[in-house]
Image (spheres, helix red, strand yellow):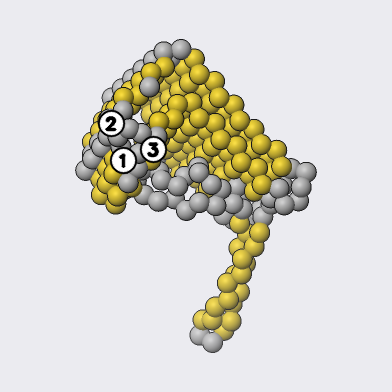
Amino acid sequence: AVNSGTIYADASANASKSGTGVGEAGALGIGVFGPDDPTITNSGTIDVSAVADAAMIAFASATGILYAAEASGSIVNSGTIIADATVIGGATYTTTTNYTVSSVPFTNTYTHLDDEAYAAGIRVDAGSISTHVTNSGVIDVSAVNDQLGVAEAIGIDLGAQGIAVDALAVPLAASSIDGVVDNSGTISAAASGGEDAIAVGIRLRANEIVGIVSNSGLIDVVAHGTDTAGEGTGTAHAT
């Protein structure tokens, strides 16, 4: 797969009028789901955007390049990848935990929201990953969630099985990563709002990691979590 031109992908979902509405929007620039040893090259521009607006659950996913297979091969970006995901609305729900300490009963009530905004520049999903990912260009990703839930902005995401597939999916890590990630370009990741705001330049998740990550470029990440429900649960992670 080779892109030397311009790819635009915009997705929007609106389920805000129904009290039980679920809105899911997914935008993808380049998606390769096999073979096992591809070469994916971008020297042009990939610009993807997803917006989900829902009364109950809103889920937005924007990914510039996705490779989903038992992953080897290579992904090379010398161009520009922009990915923006935005979640609007959504409704909270509560869970209650009862417990006893020294014969004294206690009750904790937690407020949750399943909304998620996920944006990634380059993402590889596989059980075993030996892909070589090279960025000498620009990767700029942002995720915004105006309620609780999660906002994730990841520049390069390896081993992210289950992320941004379904709003209620449980993320699974890859079994192993022994590939190479080499950044000599610029990676910017920004996440804001949500119960958890997570911004990561390069993320590797696996049960075993023996690969190499090299950075001689610029990685700029910022995360801002917001406690919109007054539960004191707004957290931010910038890596």
Whole-angstrom CA distance, mark 1 to mark 2, is 9 Å
Q: Residues within 10 Å of mark 1 (few under 14, many from 20)?
A: many
Residue to which mark 3 is pinned: 68
Q: Confirm or deny contact between disc 1 and disc 2 (CB under 8 A).
A: no
Residue 46 shows in the view: yes
Whole-angstrom CA distance, mark 1 to mark 3, is 7 Å
State the SS at label 1.
loop
Dot 1 or dot 2, earlier in sequence: 2
Residue that sits furthest to the top in the current view: 5
* Foreground pick, 233 / 11: 11
Residue to which mark 2 is pinned: 37
Q: Give percent across and percent down for residue 179.
A: 25, 36
Q: Amino acid at mark 1?
A: Glu
Q: Give percent across and percent down for residue 191.
A: 52, 37
Please tell me in which quadrant of the rendered image residue 58 appears.
top right
Q: Quadrant of the C terminus?
A: top left
Q: Residues within 10 Å of mark 2 (few under 14, many from 20)?
A: some
State the SS at label 2.
loop
Residue to which mark 1 is pinned: 70
Residue depicted at 35% across the width and 24% down the height: 40
Residue that sits furthest to the bottom in the current view: 103
Q: Give percent across and percent down for residue 155.
A: 42, 32
Whole-angstrom CA distance, mark 2 to mark 3, is 11 Å
Asked whether, in this view, residue 169 is left or right of residue 232, the answer is left
Dot 2 or dot 3, earlier in sequence: 2
State the SS at label 3.
strand
Residue depicted at 70% across the width and 38% down the height: 14
Q: Amino acid at mark 3?
A: Ala
Q: Where 39 falls versus 130 (above or below)?
A: above
Residue 217 shows in the view: no
Asked whether, in this view, residue 118 is left or right of residue 95, the answer is left
